[in-house]
Amino acid sequence: MRIIDRLAKDLSIPEGKPVEVQDSHDTQRFVDLVTEYLDMELNLAFQLNPEKCFNFGRKMRRKYSMTLKEVEETVNNVAYEVLKKRSGEIRGLLCHPLYDSYLGYFVSGLYHDIIKDKVLTLTPKVPGMLVSTRVGFCWGFGFRHPGGNLTIEGYAGGHLGEEMEDGRIVVTGYTGDEVGKGMKGGEILIRGNVSWRLGDSMESGKIIVFGNAGQYVGIGMKGGTIKIKGRVSSFGQREGGKIFLWKEGGWKEIE
C-alpha cells in the first residue's frame, strides 16, 4: 500500500448523519446568545472553571431551543461579528492573569446534547489578537465530545478534545496546547501542527497528527495511542499508552 493511501485510510471519516438543514431568519436571537456568553466571560465568570462555561452553553441551548444547524450558523456566521464589535473590551483584558477565551467550551456545551451521530462542521473566526496572544491557546473546542463527527476548518485553538468521550474530531488546520488532555475515547485527527503537551493525561482513544508536535508529547499519558507523522520537539514522562512516529514508510513505536 502506498504511503499516501495509508495516510488517507487513517484520515477517513466514518459516515454520519449530516446536520439537518433548516432556514434560520432570527439572527438576532443568536447575537443575543453570543452576547450573553461574552458578557459572562468579560466579567471573568468562567476563568479557571471551563466546566462552568461548558454547562452554561448547555443551558443556553435549551433556553434558545437551538438545533444543531443553528449552532453551526451561530459559530460560523454570528460569533465573529459579536467578538469583533467587543474587541476593545477584550483587548483591555489581555493582560489580566485570569483571562482566557473559553469560546470552545461554550460551543461544546451548545452542541453536546444534540450532536448524537450527526456531522457538525465549524469554521470559527476570531479577531487576530485572540490567535496571536496566549488566549488563543485555551479555547476548548470538542470538550467532552460525546459522539458524532466534529470538523473544524482552520485554527482550532488549544485544549481541543479535552476529556473527549467518543466520536471523531478532524482539524484541517493547526491547534494550540494540550490537545486531547484527559481524553477518554474517540479519535482526533489533525492535518497541521500541534503545540506542546499533546495527549496530556490521556486515558484512552487515538490521536493522529500529520504535522509536527511541540514539547512534552504524551506527558502523564495513561493509555490510548498517539501517532505523529512530522517532527517531535520532546516527549514527556508517561505511565502507559503507545506513541508512534512515521519512519521509513511506516509507523514505528517509541519506547
Image (cartoon, rainbow, N blue to C red):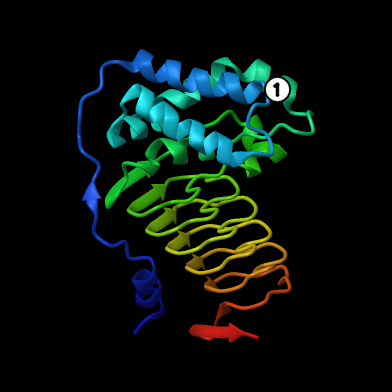
- Looking at the image, residue 50 sits to the left or right of residue 81; the answer is right
**Does residue 229 lie above or below 54 as drawn?**
below
User: Residue at 55% of width from left, 59% of height from top?
Assistant: 180
User: Residue at 48% of width from left, 84% of height from top?
Assistant: 250
Foreground residue among 225 and 193:
225
Count the labels in the image. 1
Badge 1 density bin: few <14, some 14–19, many ≥20, Cα 10 Å: few
Query: Dividing the image into 4 quarters, which one contains the C terminus?
Result: bottom right
Foreground residue among 210 and 34:
34
The spot of residue 153 in percent (x, y) is 43, 45
Foreground residue among 218 and 9:
218
- Looking at the image, residue 167 sits to the left or right of residue 15; the answer is right
Query: Dividing the image into 4 quarters, which one contains the N terminus?
Result: bottom left
Q: Give the residue at mark 1.
A: 91
**Does residue 63 lie above or below 208 as drawn?**
above
User: Residue at 36% of width from left, 16% of height from top?
Assistant: 29
**Does residue 200 lie above or below 36 as drawn?**
below
Q: Amino acid at mark 1?
A: Arg
- Looking at the image, residue 6 sits to the left or right of residue 212; the answer is left
Answer with the quarter of the image where residue 246 lies: bottom right
Check disc 1 and report its element: helix, strand or loop: helix
- Looking at the image, residue 224 sits to the left or right of residue 32; the answer is right
The spot of residue 236 in percent (x, y) is 72, 70
User: Residue at 64% of width from left, 39% of height from top?
Assistant: 49
The spot of residue 15 in percent (x, y) is 24, 59
The spot of residue 137 in percent (x, y) is 64, 44
